[in-house]
Image (tube, rainbow, N blue to C red):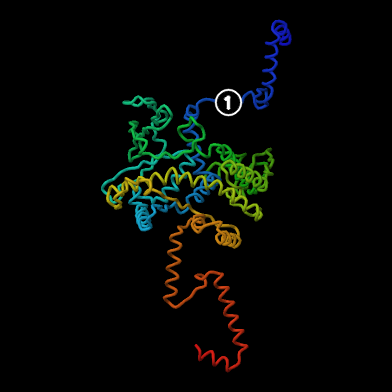
Amino acid sequence: MIKILEKAIAAISPQWACNRAFYAENLRAYEAGEVTRFNDGWVPIDGDTENEDKTQRDLVKARARYLENNSDIAGAAVGGIVRNVVGTGIKPQARTGDERLNKEIESLWKEWTRPENCDITGQQTFEEMQAMLLRRKIVDGEILVKKVIDKRGRFPLKLQVIKSDLLSQYLLRAPKTNNVIRSGIELDDHLRPLAYWIDKKTPDGYTEYDPTRVRADEIIHLWTRSQPDQIRGMSDLTPIIKRLKDTQDYLDAETVAAKIAACFSVFITTQTGAPGMVGRIGSTKDPEKKKIQSIRPGMIKYLAPGESVTTANPSRGIASAKDYVSIQERLAGAGLGLSYELMSRDFNSSSFSAARQGMLEDRKTFEPIQQFLSAHLCTPIYREWLDTCVLAGTLDIPDYFANREAYQAVEWVTPGWSWIDPQKEVNADISAIQNGGKTLSQWCAERGYDWREQLEQMALEKETAESLGLKLAVHTPISVQAAMSNHVGGDSAQDDDKTEGEKEDDEKEE
């Protein structure tokens, strides 16, 4: 029928027939776009990102939280990222151009990061809040931080962490401005957030669906944007949630099978069912009068006359389970940008070069996240904190607002990492520093140190040693040590060649 139609079209309009043949051939150019009996159930709908995400966001979030609490593989992945990205905390280095002022700002910042100063609940340091915020961003996909001004304390700025669950889901238009509200965020025509509509939560845990409008400049919204029309985040665990749950279910089944295989039970068939009993009467309960429902180690069970038993002997072993789990961990780690060693904590089968390459790839995953936290969390808070400190009189900078950007200049020191072979790394770093390929500031930053604190501590140690009459080799450059050694050695050799009279003349001259 189709061929007859094509011939008829060709007879009427050859150009039309040629176009039909051209487009039909193009439809067959991509196998990925074919719909056959093998994939006719896989026809995803491509639409607006937020309209698609909001229907599944809460379910995906709940599943991710479940795995965070119950899956050791998920816990290892999330914990590994938080441990390497935040560690002991991301700390600032002020860059105002005035060293005295830099030290004063950093000292005040250190004081502010105490729980009673930075946390509105008074329970977490700023470094601990960083770790929690990153964890929630990974698992929940997003987290909110509200900047609260409390004029009663020395430091007016405090932080309030708000779960994304409290973003209102019901408002469609702002009451006064009539701006569009989507998933709790009030937007302009360019999808720029203008305000966040947040439901209230009482101390006893109940949500009051009477949202409060909070201006966008008072909220820090941490999430990863992967689509241009996306306005809220999805859990970073989304691509691997199903794999993690399947692996957990598999391990649960293997555990049950191992327990059954470990139970060696004896089933006895008799003509009377059991000693002193008729048939199976009374034999279905244990000595505690509880019904027998499972196999126990060393159990002896009497059967009724004529019954026989076929023993179930699970043939699966731990070796097959290990192979399956390692594959799943490797794939789950790849989905998060993590190496198998970090996911599994298994280093037995890794060579030195493989482990080092895995560590380097992991760092390429961690470093962008550190930059994300520095840019989207630490820097906005640091700027707001400086503003409030100057306004409160905690910092005395007369021309601060006239040169605000210069005074807010800052660099963030992120936690560093150690190497598998420290000796090789140290030698390479010494060579790079001596040849100008790396500065002391860069070297310290790679390890999470403040280069000023390093120099100040070195100067203090040198001064203390000299005050005690000590000269430590660590305070003398290697080249100077070598020159001194050669000089001392040469003088000794020359002295040995002198006569006693020459030595006495030298002493007189001295």
Residue 382 on image: x %, y %: 38, 47
Residue lying at 70% horizontally and 11% vertically, measured from the top left: 17
User: Residue 80: percent from the left, percent from the top?
Assistant: 53, 49
Q: Work out which residue is located at the far left of the displayed protein and give it.
A: 152
Question: Where is residue 221, by image quadrant?
Answer: top left
Q: Nearer the viewer, residue 150 or 398?
A: 398
Say above or below: 32 vs 371. Answer: above
Q: Quadrant of the N terminus?
A: top right
Q: Residue at label 1?
A: 44
Q: Secondary structure at mark 1?
A: loop
Q: Would residue 434 be found to the left or right of residue 8 on screen?
A: left
Residue 505 visible in this rendered orientation of the protein: yes
In the displayed orientation, state which residue is furthest to the bottom: 501
Q: Residues within 10 Å of mark 1 (few under 14, many from 20)?
A: few
Q: Is residue 282 visible?
A: no
Task: Find residue 117 and report its horizontal and vertical position in percent.
Answer: 33, 51
Q: Find residue 220 and report its image quarter.
A: top left
How many marks overall?
1
Q: Nearer the viewer, residue 266 or 360?
A: 360
- Residue 256: name its quadrant: top right
**Residue in the foreground of this view, choosing between 355 and 306:** 355
Q: Is residue 182 above or below residue 97?
A: above
Tell me what residue is drawn at x 43 percent, y 64 percent: 456
Image coordinates of residue 118 in percent, x first then y, are 35, 49
Indicate the amino acid at tag 1.
Pro
Q: Residue at x 67, y 39 (%)?
A: 305
Q: Nearer the viewer, residue 289 or 337?
A: 337
